[in-house]
Amino acid sequence: MTPPSVSQAAADPVANAPVPTPRRDALRRAWRSLSKAVWPLLAIAVLLVIMFAAVAGPAISPKDPNRQNIISRLQPPMVADRDGVVQHYLGTDGLGRDVLSRLIYGARVSLLVGFTAVFIGGVLGVVLGMTAGYVGGRVDAVIMRLADIQLAFPFILLAIMFLVVLGSGVLNLVLILGIGQWVTYARIARGQTMSQREKEYVEAARALGARGPSVLFQTILPNILAPLIVIASFNVASVILSEAALSFLGLGVPPTVPTWGGMLAESRDQLLAGRWWLAVYPGVAIMLTVLSFNILGDWLRDFLDPRLRGVG
């Protein structure tokens, strides 16, 4: 049998078809999975809107969020002035500040604290957990006992204690919330590392000369990222709730910085007087953000589970 000519190979569509790469195949599977699911798409759309508001806050905010106008205080939503123009679409608070502008700027604080705290807690927890699971012995015992000690204290009380000592501020809030998240990542990373460290591909990496950090972060880490990514998506929602709770108690960021939790705290004295918009709008913003992250986390859990990759 004679080999096919060059012209025949060039004309063969199968031979010229592009070879799918793992990244392209993963993106294709993700899009196919998203196209069949309605709620994850809605969650992503909501999160994109919130992120756009957080990034483009100064450009799209109708008013200065801290500008006070006592004449316009406690104005209901969609009330027109004498000229028939609506100045405050979502009303004003007790100091005459625009509620919509404060909602937009509050998204910046919530997302900044959420993503940064999860990043700090994730990096710290993954490093300590993988080290404990790979080295074992006394190192494992010391790291896990530190995790048990932190879990013995209610986190919200621990955060309140440190914020009272260190003072309020975005940096202190991010550090405390980030350090408070490391235990979850450490326990998962430790268990996953212990189950992977004796696998054949890890032994092959050691046989090729890889040692210590190289085995951990170049060989084992890529194979245990899936559960860590899922936990991170859920933790963003929990951190946003914790930030709102601490701001509601007056221990989060300074009062001059608009936050959703701070807006809820300022609405406490106005609810009995029927000023519902002061609590409803920041409450709905928190609910939609947390719910969207939870729905996205559910979808990521199903998508990254190898047992479900062949389904659908």
Image (cartoon, rainbow, N blue to C red):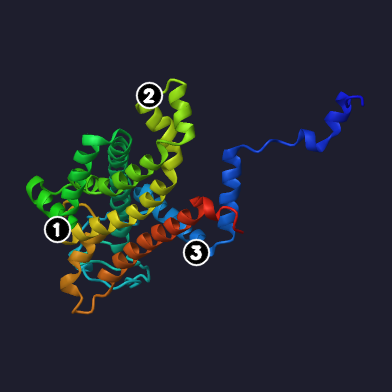
Residue 211: numbered disc: 2
The single residue placed furthest to the right in the displayed view is 1
- Circle nearer the N terminus (1, 2): 2
Residue matched to label 3? 39
- Circle nearer the N terminus (3, 1): 3
Please name the residue shown 51% across and 53% down the image. 303
Frontmost residue, 182 versus 128: 128
Vertical placement of 156 versus 143: above or below? below
Amino acid on which the number 1 mark rests in the picture: Gly
Residue matched to label 1? 250
Circle 3 residues within 10 Å: few <14, some 14–19, many ≥20 = some
Circle 2 residues within 10 Å: few <14, some 14–19, many ≥20 = few
Q: Based on the displayed image, in which of its 4 quarters is residue 259 positioned?
A: bottom left
Alpha carbon separation for disc pair 3 and 1: 34 Å
Q: Position of residue 164 (x, y in %)?
A: 8, 51
Question: Is the residue under label 1 in contact with that under label 3 (CB below 8 Å)?
Answer: no
Query: SS class of the residue under badge 1?
Result: loop
What is the tally of numbered marks visible in this picture? 3
Q: Position of residue 199 (x, y in %)?
A: 45, 36
- Circle nearer the N terminus (2, 3): 3
* Image quadrant in which the C terminus is located: bottom right
Amino acid on which the number 2 mark rests in the picture: Arg
Alpha carbon separation for disc pair 2 and 3: 44 Å
Pair 1/2: label in front: 2
Question: Is the residue under label 3 in contact with that under label 2 (CB below 8 Å)?
Answer: no
Query: SS class of the residue under badge 2?
Result: loop
Frontmost residue, 186 versus 46: 186
Circle 1 residues within 10 Å: few <14, some 14–19, many ≥20 = some
Q: Is 143 displayed left or right of 13 in the figure? A: left
Vertical placement of 276 versus 68: above or below? below
Q: Position of residue 131 (x, y in %)?
A: 30, 35
